[in-house]
Image (cartoon, rainbow, N blue to C red):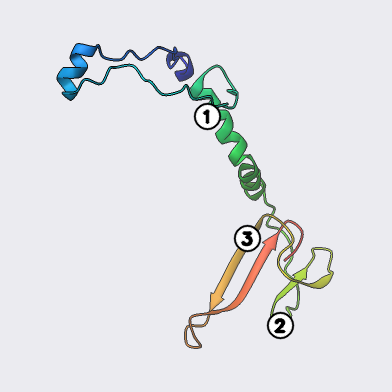
């Protein structure tokens, strides 16, 4: 049996306490009815008749992009050849798998694997970084 078929909710009115009980609990003559103006607020439509499914759908919409990134990372082919020579320059150098080399401000792809090396004797800052994407090193 699916959990969603067990967890069905029905809307029910919340009854207020009667006046006598209210006086006993709160020791005041305040009636149990509200004199405030009704509040009119427009709520977004539910994405499903079930509140549980409504929030599941919203959460799936919010994480879909990141799930797609994870799916891409999980199917990542790691058989790309490394460049024969690396440029030792400040900034990002992009080595495409077809052999092109270009300077870029940052990796162009959305998903890449990143590694940083430090030389502790020279300081705590990164000395070398490399990123591998589906398109380039």
**Percent from the top left, x then y, of residue 46?**
58, 23
Residue at disc 2, secondary structure: loop
**Percent from the top left, x then y, of residue 13?**
39, 12
Q: How far apart are marks 3 and 2 (CA)?
A: 20 Å
**Percent from the top left, x then y, of residue 88?**
70, 83
Residue at the spot of label 3: 113
Residue nearest the viewer, comparing 22 with 135? 22
Residue at disc 3, secondary structure: strand
* Residue displayed at 19% across by 23% down: 28
Q: Which mark sits nearer the N-terminus, 3 or 2? A: 2
Can you tell which mark lies on residue 68?
none
Residue at the spot of label 1: 55
The residue mark sitting in front, 3 or 2, is 2
Q: State the quadrant of the C terminus.
A: bottom right
The correct choice, above or below, for 100 with respect to 58 in the image is: below
Residue at disc 1, secondary structure: helix
Q: Mark 3 and 2 residues: CB-CB less than 8 Å, in contact?
A: no
Residue nearest the viewer, comparing 53 with 21? 21
The 10 Å Cα crowd at callout 3, few under 14, some 14 to 19, many 20 or more, is: few
Drawn side of residue 12 relative to residue 63, left or right? left
The 10 Å Cα crowd at callout 2, few under 14, some 14 to 19, many 20 or more, is: few
Q: Which mark sits nearer the N-terminus, 1 or 3? A: 1
Q: Which mark sits nearer the N-terminus, 1 or 2? A: 1
Residue at the spot of label 2: 89
Q: How far apart are marks 1 and 3 (CA)?
A: 32 Å
The correct choice, above or below, for 38 with respect to 131 in the image is: above
The correct choice, above or below, for 126 with respect to 16 in the image is: below
């Amino acid at each position: 049996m699916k959990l969603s078929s067990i967890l069905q909710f029905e809307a029910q009115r919340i009854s207020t306490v009667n006046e006598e009980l209210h006086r006993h609990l709160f020791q005041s003559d305040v009636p149990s009815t509200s004199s405030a103006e009704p509040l009119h607020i427009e709520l977004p439509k539910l994405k499903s008749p079930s509140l549980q499914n409504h929030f599941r759908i919203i959460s799936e919409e919010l994480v879909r992009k990141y799930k797609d990134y994870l799916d891409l990372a999980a199917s990542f082919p790691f058989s790309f050849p490394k460049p024969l020579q690396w440029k030792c320059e400040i900034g990002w150098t992009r080595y495409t798998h077809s052999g092109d080399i270009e300077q870029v401000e940052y990796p162009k792809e959305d998903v890449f694997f990143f590694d940083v090396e430090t030389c502790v004797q020279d300081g705590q800052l990164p000395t070398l970084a490399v990123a591998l994407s589906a398109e380039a090193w």
